Amino acid sequence: MIRSWSSDIRFWVALAFAARLVGITNPPLETSHHWRQTSVLMVARNYAEQGVDMLHPRMDTAGSLTGITGMEFPLLNMLIAWGMLLFGDAYWPGRLIVLLVGSLGVLCFHKLVHRHLGATVALYAALLLLFSLWFMYARKVMPDVFAVSLVLIGLERLDAARGTHSPWASLVLGSLLISAGLLSKITAGCLLAVWPVLAWPQRRTWIVQLGTWLVAVATLPALWWYFQWVPHLVETYGFWHFFMGGSMAEGAVQLVRNWPRTLDNFYFDALRFSGFAVFLLGLYFAVKRRQHALLLAFALLSAAFLVVMLKAGDTFWVHAYYVLPFIPTMALLGGYGLAQLHNARWAHALLVIVVVEGLAAQANDFRISPQLAPLMHLEKDLGQDNGLIAMNTGQVPTAMYFAHRRGWTMTNATLADPATLKTLQQEGCTRIVVFKRTFDTAVELPWPVLLENDLYRIHGAQGVERTPR
């Protein structure tokens, strides 16, 4: 009985799902990427409060502007907004949506690998994916795992269409899911590079040919959104938010200049040290045993992901989650490598080491950062005034989200400029929040202090009296 459970990926996915329900009601104040989660939630809350307009997502950090700007297609934001309408300001609906889709992504990844490389490789590969960096980011309110999972599910459906007498449902569903995944995060599109390898054995059948056309068509909405609509929103509404990358030549220079940090995303963040060793083991066996299809898939996926890296440049190594679209590739090779070991006990032992190291490195994701926890009181501390606010958080929107206000995020140097203070007051700014150390060092301002605690000071416009504690 125990052996049958341990060899069933559904058991492990369910177990990992249950484990990540711990702290799922927490606000997005973990140490890792709270800023990215609050930018997603900010748009979702605006949808919940002002109505859903998919073509015009709105941020709160644009000062006196509308806040409408270009960004990822707000599918996830819309789903979270519906959760907010049903359950109020609870954070768990957004986390749960990503967790559900991320879990389905692992199951469909397992199906896809099982169909082509067998049960053992599929189980090992899916477990490596499940307990990789995926484990942590599949409970964060971010589009990365959400988008990659949609593409994986879509690819599995298109691939499955070849083995059924009624392929239309799988073909249509697969292409729609791929399109939704690319819209949600265009970098997830690098996974489509595996399709030629999947399609080649039956390339002359009408189902595979149609599937190839559908893959191509599925990319069109994302191309329109990111390369036409996003620039249009930025130009029309005057607020830049979304990073579209730079030139690949410039990105190559940046990655080479910071090559230790670039490699760190692969040998540490993605699967940790032990997982990276297992990945290299799989690559070794694939070369040794001349697994041409597997090596071709690896080469195509790597080439596609290299484009993502070159476009991102320094941003790639700064943010660990940029490696998420490539982790299924590493897990696939790692699963193949483990399956080649003659003694299954060695494979199981290595797998346990990878899982333990991965979980230990991600355990802090279940806790709220003590430094950030006081932000939960910021909205109340700002009082009844609903005017625009400014704060010294640089480009980080976390505090603005918890303030539940609109306004500006600035550096200390900008905020301390007398001309800036004058402009802010002219444009309707009535409060300035100065963080003492969490986002920046404290800066002295001539505006009167209304409230002060260990984390921040709240300044009011000239002529506003201090609020009693």
Image (cartoon, helix red, strand yellow):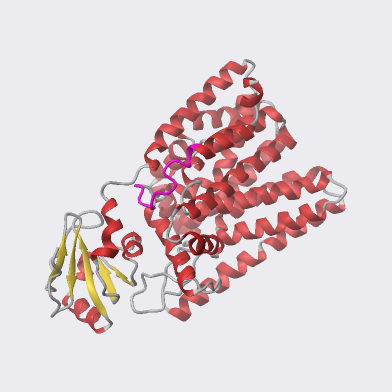
Q: What residue sits 55% from the left and 45% below the top?
A: 326
Query: Which part of the image, by quadrant, shows the N terminus?
Result: top right
Q: Could you say which is closer to the camera, residue 264 or residue 66?
A: 66
Q: For residue 202: magenta?
A: no
Percent from the top left, x then y, of residue 33? 39, 51
Percent from the top left, x then y, of residue 134? 51, 42
Q: What residue sits 44% from the left and 51% below the top?
A: 316
Q: For residue 28: magenta?
A: yes
Image-quadrant location for residue 440: bottom left
Percent from the top left, x then y, of residue 413? 20, 67
Do we see residue 287 in this rendering?
A: no
Q: Is residue 359 above or below residue 424?
A: above
Magenta part of the chain: 19-31
Image-quadrant location for residue 106: top right
Q: Could you say which is closer to the camera, residue 5 or residue 317?
A: 5
Query: Which part of the image, by quadrant, shows the C terminus?
Result: bottom left
Q: Could you say which is closer to the camera, residue 396 or residue 378?
A: 378
